[in-house]
Structure formats: structure tokens, C-alpha cells
Amino acid sequence: MNIYSNIRKDADLQKLGPSYSFAKTLRKYVDKPVCIISNARGGTSLSKFSNGGEYYTPMMERISRANDFGTVKGVIWHHGEANSSNYASYLGTLNSLVGDIRGAVDTNFYFLAGQLGPWDGKYEGFNENLTQIQSYIDNADYVHNDRIEHLGDETHFNTPSQLLMGSRYAQKILEELYDIPIGVYEFYLPDELIVTSGTDTIRTGERIIYTTQWSDVLSFTLHCNEGLGFDTLAINNSLISVSDGAQSYEFSAGSRDTVFSITASFEIVSNEAETTKPALGFYPNPSTR
């Protein structure tokens, strides 16, 4: 969505970001139109967005137009690499910027920031500092970076991590602003399995990001491809007791942000065994970096 920013870099530099799955997840659960104003620029320090900075005026002009479409409910803010080495004053400066934006749209909107990558301690100080955001900024929170991975450059998130982070932003926004609790789940599945939840069929794949409305009785069901049955089954390295040749297994969703790594071996229970991947999927294939 950064392609729509009025302060962005060249168009060919605008790749997948967390706004993609954030928007799709909101659309899945909110039964009314939601306008998203994207106004971002990568690789830029906070001072350039702040009052007196290069991008302050065009950014404020764009944000002020939000009032033409309705009430600003929230802002998601994923930023910080350029300030990661001098993070001590970051939240104080950010609070001033949030105050300016709230003044421009005349509402105390919910402000949600995201942690940077967790790798090699590179952003450890910045990320720890961000956990104190509620001490600096009213009506604010942050999104954690557990299980986030990079492209190989120790800066940019890879595609599954962008989808995961966007889903986590949506999870917080949905609960805080719409009173809709959702769970965000990751699945690692072999090709011979699909997993369902209610009427949803979740596609198989190397790493799947899936959201669903959460309840304390939420469960998932694993299904073997036609003609196959379980020989062995393990979830997160814990061996599961299943009946020999069973073709499905139901298990609890657990907490609202969980990864399920599933390994299994199979036996043929009929002559119709096949291992074709299911066609249904939760996310279409987005462009990757």
C-alpha cells in the first residue's frame, strides 16, 4: 500500500508490507466500509516526519483529508530502523508527533506501533524501549515481534513475517476498536494434510498465517488426503496418540497467538490415496520482495 503514499520513494521500491494482511484481515471481520490512508516512507528517521522535518507538511496534509471520509479510529506505525541506535528519546519525540496528528484530525485515536526484527540483538534496545509506549503516549500499544524473520538482510521482513505482523496489527485494532477478538495462528503442514476450522479450509504449505474469530472452545481439525490415514502424528514435537489409520484429528487452538508445527507419517487406507494440495487458501499469493 505504500505505493499510495505522497512521500514515498520510487514506485519500484514499494514492496509487500504489513498493511496488506492488515487490510485483508479487517475486511474479513468488519461489516462496514473501512478507509485506510497509507502514508509511509521507508528508511527515514523520525525527525523528518516531525514538525519542521522534510515530510511533516505533506504528511499532515494527507492525514487531514481523512476527515473527508469519516472519523479516524486508529493509526498503525511501523518505524524505527533509522532511530535504533538513539532510541532513548524516541518515544518522547513520537508522542509530540502523535499529538500533532491527533490535533489535525480532532480525535484521540488509538495508536499502535510495531517492534523491529528480533535478530542478533540488533534492535534489542529499541524494541525493549517500545514496550514502554503506554508510559509516553495515551491510548497506545505495541505489537510484538515473536517469530519474525528477515529476507537475509537483517532489516526487512520476509513475506510470511509481513503477513504475520499485519495480522497482529489487525488483531489489536479489531479488539480495541470493534470489540472483535481474533486469534492469529501459524501452521507448518506436510503436503498430505489440510486443516479446517469451522467452515474455513486452510491451505497446506511451508508456513501459513491464518486468523479466525477467537473463543475459548476454538479448535482445528487435521484431515489426511483421500486414501491416507495417520501412522504417526506430532504437534510441536509432542507425539499425539491417534488410532491406527485414523484420517482426521481435532485439537484445541490454545492461546490467541500460536504456532503449530505438524509432522506426520501416513499409511494407505484405500487405493484412492493421492497427495494433491488443496486448492483453497486463506491468502492469495502477494508480490514478494
Image (cartoon, rainbow, N blue to C red):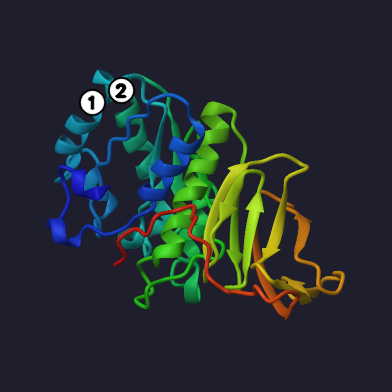
Find residue 100 and report its horizontal and vertical position in percent: 30, 30
Badge 1 amino acid = Ser
Q: In which quarter of the image is residue 182?
A: top right
Q: Earlier in the sequence, mark 1 or mark 2?
A: 1
Position of 141 compared to 7: left or right?
Answer: right
Position of 107 compared to 180: left or right?
Answer: left
Nearer to us in this view, 212 or 12: 212
Above or below, 236 against 175 in this view is below
Badge 2 amino acid = Val
* Residue found at x 64% / y 59%: 195
Residue topped by disc 2:
105
Above or below, 32 against 149 in this view is above
Nearer to us in this view, 277 or 62: 277
Position of 153 compared to 207: left or right?
Answer: left
* Residue found at x 49% / y 77%: 120
Residue 134 seen in the current view? no
* Residue found at x 17% / y 40%: 52
Mark 1 touches mark 2? (CB < 8 Å): yes
Q: In which quarter of the image is the C terminus?
A: bottom left
Please, what secondary structure does the residue beneath circle 1 have? helix
Please, what secondary structure does the residue beneath circle 2 have? helix
> Mark on residue 64?
1
The residue carrying pointer 2 sits among few (fewer than 14), some (14 to 19) or many (20 or more) residues within 10 Å by Cα, namely some
Q: Residue lying at the far front in this picture: please name it.
A: 271
Q: How many labels does the image show?
A: 2
Position of 279 compared to 93: left or right?
Answer: right
Find residue 96 and report its horizontal and vertical position in percent: 34, 36
* Residue found at x 75% / y 66%: 247
